[in-house]
Image (cartoon, rainbow, N blue to C red):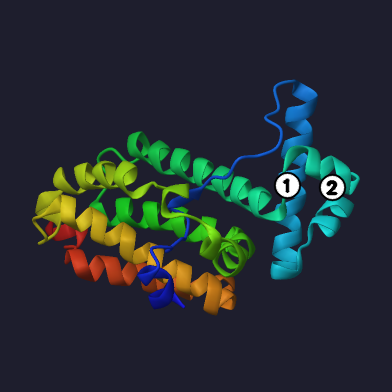
Amino acid sequence: MVARDVAAGHILCVLKRPRLPIRREPRQPRALATRAHILEAASRCLRELGPDASMTRIAEVAGYSIGTLYQYFPDRRSLLCELMHEVCERELHAVMALVPALQGAHVAEVINAVLGVLVTSAAEHRGVIQVLVTDVLPTLEPNALEDLVPTIAPLLAQQLRIRANQMTVRDFDMAARFILVSVEALVHDAAVEHPEWFDEDALLSEVKALVHGYLAVRPESSA
């Protein structure tokens, strides 16, 4: 699954923001609240039903008519893309918020915090990822995906650079990109092929071990 998606230029985890036109751009508070409620209902349906989460079922969970959903989203594909866009937006803010909180922290703590955000977000939204990969991404043009890696990688590289004595890797820009792209692929594969892995702590622990090994992180006592 991952190899096929990569070849098609459609790798997605939580670092790609797909965006399609929506039927109605809300402006008023009531319309904004309706849109948010629809997206929350879609998220719940996807957690429970996965690919079987239809527009009709989403409307039922939201408590709206199917016509109301179509006032905001022209089809299921645009709704799913908008939902994933919001998920990515929240995740981007969460990663950026880590920077001031981790000042002076050991590199292992920095890596663990970033990976925690990525894996936790993927676990919470595994249903969205599954449906996007199987039903939506094959229909999208590459320019419909906004890549967040170029935004997050420089922040991570900077945090690695100021902790250079705590690891053996030296090309921090390359390392930051390797980490994000690799973890994206691993979490993507888990969401599609082994969603049950997110129900255990083992997945996050294994991803942390992989990245720590790549960086050759030195113990805090020897940093």
- Residue under the point 9% across and 52% down: 165
Disc 2: CA contacts within 10 A as few (<14), some (14-19) or many (>=20) = many
- Is 190 placed left or right of 37 in the picture? left
- Residue under the point 80% across and 44% down: 69
Evaluate if marks 2 and 1 touch, with contact meaning CB atoms under 8 Å apart. yes
Secondary element at image label 2: helix
Mark 1 sits on what residue? 40
- Which of the image's four quarters has the C terminus? bottom left
- Residue under the point 60% across and 40% down: 21
- Is 128 placed left or right of 28 in the picture? left
CA gap between label 2 and label 1 equals 8 Å
Mark 2 sits on what residue? 62
Disc 1: CA contacts within 10 A as few (<14), some (14-19) or many (>=20) = some
- Residue 22 percent across, percent down from the top left: 66, 39
Is 134 in front, or is 119?
Answer: 134
Is 84 in front, or is 155?
Answer: 84
Using the rendered view, name the quadrant where residue 199 is placed.
bottom right
- Residue 148 percent across, percent down from the top left: 38, 46
Using the rendered view, name the quadrant where residue 37 is placed.
top right
Q: Amino acid at mark 1?
A: Glu
- Is 2 placed left or right of 31 in the picture? left
Secondary element at image label 1: helix
- Residue under the point 17% across and 50% down: 173
Q: Amino acid at mark 2?
A: Ala
